[in-house]
Every structure is written in structure tokens, then in C-alpha cells.
Image (tube, helix red, strand yellow):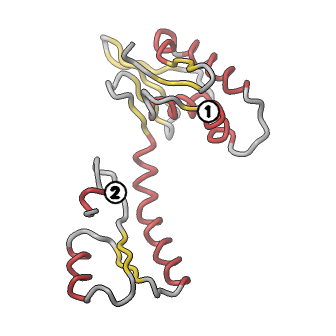
Amino acid sequence: MSPAAVKKNDIATPVLMFAKAGTLPNKKIAEYLQNGYDDFIQSDIDPRVLEAKLLVSLRWALPVSARAMEEVRSRSGLIKVNKAKHVVSIKRHDGFYEVSGLTQTELSILAMLVGREGNVVGREFILDSVWRGKVVNLENVDKHIEALRAKLSCFGKNIETVYGLGYCYRENK
């Protein structure tokens, strides 16, 4: 896979090349690095050096990924969820208006659903992602979805219940 194939949608992702020690000449390694690979790692690398290299790659990638996830938009752009600013904006014919009164939990759930628009997100996945290891009843997800639908008014109908599976955000009904 070429580095260009991995760096899609202007989201920076470190691209590491792994190879068995001694299989590639230095000229070829240099060519790969000049053409977009971010690092080259041979199979005989010291585990401590490998760990350090991976941490460097993560430090480089995480701020970019975090910025990309600050704001989630629906495909149509009718709804925007800015987690950093704790703001949900809905587009109306006369511009955007902000939805007020959402809790941090509701905002996290909405961002998750809008970010996976058209895909079913399981109740247990929502529970594990939002409450992160806390002991919480699965019905809490349902109650938060119910409150979220009410606060989103007419946009609340875009959160579908997929019985036995979870929830799905879908604008095109």
C-alpha cells in the first residue's frame, strides 16, 4: 500500500514500513522514505527502540486526530456537534441555531451517532464508550437517547432505534 492510499481525506496518519532485516538495500529504503513513508523499521530492531519509534509516531498523529474529532458533521451538513465547545448547531432555512441544554453525555452520544451516520451503533458500544468502564445500567443509554430526541425537536426523529441492535442517525428517511 502506498502512503498516498493511507493519507486520505487530509487526515494525517503516520505510515510505517516494516521489513525483514537485510531484505532491502539502503537506496530502496531512502526512496520509500522520500516518497511518503514516515519511518522504516527492520525486524531485528531492539524492542525499546521500536517502542520509542511508535510513541513518536503517536505523538505526531494524535493532535491531528484530536482536532479532526472536535467537530462532527452530518453528511448533509444539517447538524454539527462541536465537542470541544460543547455546542450542537442545526441548520434551518435562515441559518444555524444552537441546541441548548444538552448534557456532556448526550453530546457524546450524539457525536458518536452523527459521526457514524447511517450505521447502527450498538447500545453496549455506546455504554462502553461514553461511560468508560463505570458500572451503568444499559437502560441509561435508552433514557439518554430519549432525552436527546426531545431536545433536538424535529431532528430527534433522525435517531432511529434498531431493535435488538442499537441506534442509527439517519437524515434521509
The location of residue 14, given as percent across then percent down, is 37, 64
| Snapshot quadrant of residue 12 | bottom left
Q: Nearer the viewer, residue 15 or 151?
A: 15
- For disc 1, the neighbor class at 10 Å (few under 14, some 14 to 19, many from 20) is few
Q: Which residue is found at the position 50% from the left and 24% from the top?
A: 168
Q: Which residue is mark 1?
A: 104
| Snapshot quadrant of residue 138 | top right
Q: Which residue is found at the position 28% from the left and 47% from the top?
A: 9
Residue 12: image tag: 2
- For disc 2, the neighbor class at 10 Å (few under 14, some 14 to 19, many from 20) is some
- Looking at the rendered structure, the secondary structure element under dot 1 is helix
Residue 38 versus residue 25 in the image, above or below:
above
On the picture, is 104 further left or further right than 117? right
The location of residue 42, given as percent across then percent down, is 40, 83
| Mark 1 vs 2: CB contact within 8 A | no
* Quadrant showing the C terminus: top left
Q: Nearer the viewer, mark 1 or mark 2?
A: 2
Residue 19 versus residue 121 in the image, above or below:
below
Query: What amino acid does circle 1 point to?
Result: Gln
CA separation in Å, label 1 and label 2: 28 Å
